[in-house]
Image (spheres, helix red, strand yellow):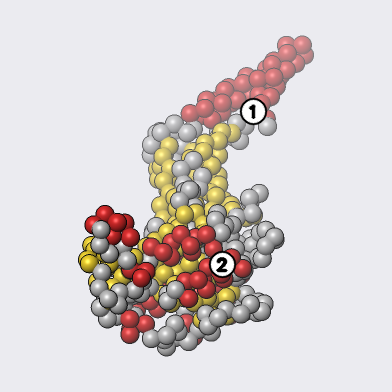
Amino acid sequence: MIGNAWLLVSILLFLGAAVLRQAPLLLIALLFLITGGVARLWARFVFERVEYRRHLSAARAFWGEEVTLEVGLTNRKLLPMPWLQITEEVPRDVTFITSKVYPSDQPTRAILSQFLSLGAYHRRVRRYRFSCPRRGYFAFGPTRVRSGDLFGFFQKDMTFPDADHLLVYPKIVPLDNLGIPSKDPFGDLRVRRHLFQDPIRVVTTRDYAAGDPQRYIHWKASARTGRLQSKVFEPTTTVDFGLFLDVRTLKYPLWGGVEQRLEVGVLAAASLAKFAVDNGFRVGLYANQFYQHSNHLIKLPPSSHPDQFLQVLEALAHVSPYEMVSMSQLVEQEARSLSWGATLVVISAAPTEALLASMLRFRRAGRRVALVHVGDETPLPSLDGLTVYHVSDDVYWREMADVRLEPQV
């Protein structure tokens, strides 16, 4: 840059004027020195009292919706900013409708760049519309602003590190679109809405009566009282729907992921959750993956809270392809805490033998269990009456391939 050699050039011009005894050259040297000094001071104070603001029109959006990114820069001083460049880091997986973005050195990021000028005590606002063709948790920022003097001799950068986040819920489709019958896909769930005893929740004990199942005998209470005692369970009419999403998409020992299969699995989980809510059941979600920017597994026990469905969709937006625990371990830990009348649905593209064995144990114990197998139709071992549905990879291309995922360049 010329600014880096400003003082040296000025000195050389003065020396040349003195040696050659040229008054015009001396004037040029003096003019260059004054101009360079003014430019240097301009660049030094150009970012004084400058405010930057970034705002998203929504913090959450549904799949396919449009959101507006608003960028504002305010100059609260007399010194104008004759030129400036704003470089905004944006997610690669959103599609800007009217503006171009450029590739970044990070594979999941893109660059939104703009040039403008800002007068004294002036504010400029730019708005960019983009669509959300992918579910996920996206960050906008940081932002780098470059400016300088009027002549371009000196430049200065300023970085605004804060980021704004947008959560995009996954797409939801009718179960028939997945190849799962929408009418009683897991049997008639409504027949289980009668009053029954939940053997997980013991409220008290009573004296043993002839005909009580042996597994309901409370041995510790019997030893304490000296008489056989039977467990008394909490009566309940709730029917829960527990969804278990396996983020692994390749069979062991392979590592990595198949993006299409993970997205089909998330699509199936969101659609099944919607089916459960529409039919009046409490839905819960468990995934062998952490929430993004967290070390907490995705665990949402069934609840009747009005916001439960949105919390399920929000958790699905955080799903990424690398498992933190095995799905068989997660099912063994969490399925036991669900009510006895709950329906357990496992969604997996690569079910292991351990996972299938766990599901069969719950099935033989009288639990209602089903497997949604995503991806290719690899033959599964005999599953002893376990309900199995296959959701093909073609669902991804049929439901989502019509959306432009590449950034505009």
| Nearer to the camera, 337 or 18 | 337
Of helix, strand and loop, which one carries label 1? helix
| Nearer to the camera, 48 or 153 | 48
In the displayed structure image, the side of residue 188 where residue 207 appears, left or right: left
1 and 2 marks in contact (CB < 8 Å): no
In the displayed structure image, the side of residue 61 where residue 375 appears, left or right: right
Q: Residue furthest right?
A: 20
In the displayed structure image, the side of residue 105 where residue 265 appears, left or right: left
Which mark is in front, 1 or 2? Answer: 2
Badge 2: residue crowd in 10 Å (few <14, some 14–19, many ≥20): many
Name the residue that disc number 1 marks: 3
Identified by mark 1, the residue type is: Gly
Residue in view at x 77 percent, y 14 percent: 20
Residue 195 is situated, as x and y percent measured from the top left of the image, at 25, 78
Query: Looking at the picture, does residue 189 appear above or below residue 167?
Result: below
Residue 86 is situated, as x and y percent measured from the top left of the image, at 53, 46
Identified by mark 2, the residue type is: Leu
Residue 202 is situated, as x and y percent measured from the top left of the image, at 28, 63
Q: Is residue 301 visible?
A: yes
Residue 249 is situated, as x and y percent measured from the top left of the image, at 62, 66
Badge 1: residue crowd in 10 Å (few <14, some 14–19, many ≥20): some
Name the residue that disc number 2 marks: 355
Residue in view at x 38 percent, y 62 percent: 337
Query: Looking at the picture, does residue 151 appear above or below residue 226?
Result: above
Q: Which image quarter holds the C terminus? A: bottom right
Give residue 338's mark.
Answer: none
Of helix, strand and loop, which one carries label 2? helix
The part of the image, by quadrant, that contains residue 218 is bottom left
